[in-house]
Amino acid sequence: TSLTAEVIKIANEKQFLSPRQTSVLSIRDAINVIGLKRLKNLVISVGFQLQNNNLAVEEVSDFNVNVARVASELTFYTEGVSEDEAYLAGLFHNAGTLLFATKYPDYDQVFLESLQYAYRGTQLENSNYGTTHTVAGILVAKKWQLDNLFNQVILMHHQRNLSKIGNSKARTLISIVQLAIALVTQSLFSNYSGEEVDQMLANSCAELMIEETLLADIRDELLKYSIS
């Protein structure tokens, strides 16, 4: 099935393969490589992508998938968050934008304009639609029965002051997603980048204790292998 094929495809990405594993050819291989719990996260991620492939505005969908990919890469530089958790968080952090994209014909432009306001972008949505994608995203999370950890990511991925996030794992995961957002925006949506994006990158790097110079390889791979 397409779900199986996509799960195997993602399981073959380098961040999921062990040094001794050259490829994943079946779901059984995937279980052996990443384990059942982590496989569940990938299945949810892929199912969500497949469900929305024909619904979402292209820019919105591409942005979310790229954030998921970069977030999983960033786990190599951090501790306490697995690749599959980061991928799932990156994919679902903007789940509400997919609902908005199908409901509001002008949302693609509102979405792109809001990218430069990495912390205040939801204000633009609220003024246009009377609600935000973070609120809509929680409805999506409930449908997919996501753990509360991912609900926190959906609600707080625009949080400027990361120290206000009490749960340490949630704070790390949100910081990873924020750093991925900044990298994707700067690299692939540079026309819509801005001061707040730069600030989000600096703040998340500080929280994760990652030197910005270490991100060069991620930027290069993002431009080389991006789906955009």
Image (cartoon, grey):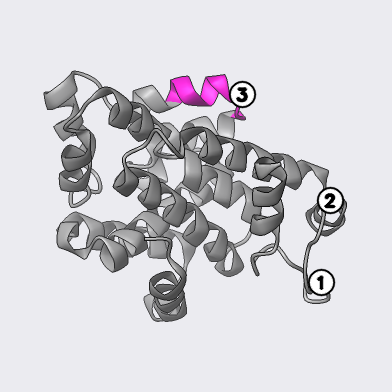
Quadrant in the rendering for residue 67: bottom left
Mark 3 or mark 1, which is nearer the start of the sequence?
1
Q: Amino acid at mark 3?
A: Gln
The verdict on residue 141 being magenta is yes
Q: CA distance from mark 2 to mark 1?
A: 13 Å
Q: Quadrant of the N terminus?
A: top right
Residue type indicated by callout 1: Gln
Camera-side residue: 152 or 185? Answer: 185
Cα distance, mark 1 to mark 3?
31 Å
Question: In this view, which residue lies farthest toward the front?
Answer: 1
Q: Which mark is residue 21?
A: 1
In the rendered view, tell whether residue 174 sits above or below residue 22: above
Could you tell me which residue is drawn at 48 percent across and 24 percent down? 140
Q: How many marks?
A: 3
> Regarding mark 1 in the picture, which secondary structure is present there?
loop
Label 1 near label 2: C-beta < 8 Å?
no
Residue at mark 3: 145
Q: Nearer the viewer, residue 40 or 121?
A: 40
In this picture, is 111 found above or below 96? below
Which residue lies under the disc numbered 2?
31
Tell me: residue 183, above or below residue 174: below
Q: Which mark is residue 96?
A: none
Q: Earlier in the sequence, mark 2 or mark 1?
A: 1
* Mark 2 → mark 3, Cα distance in angstroms: 21 Å
Residue 126: where, in percent of width, then height? Answer: 18, 25
Q: Quadrant of residue 194?
A: bottom left
Q: Is residue 73 visible?
A: yes
Q: Residue at x 24, y 44 (%)?
A: 119
Query: Callout 2: helix, strand or loop?
Result: helix
Tell me if 200 is positioned left or right of 35 in this view: left
The type of residue carrying mark 2 is Ile
Q: Magenta stretch: give its range.
A: 138-147
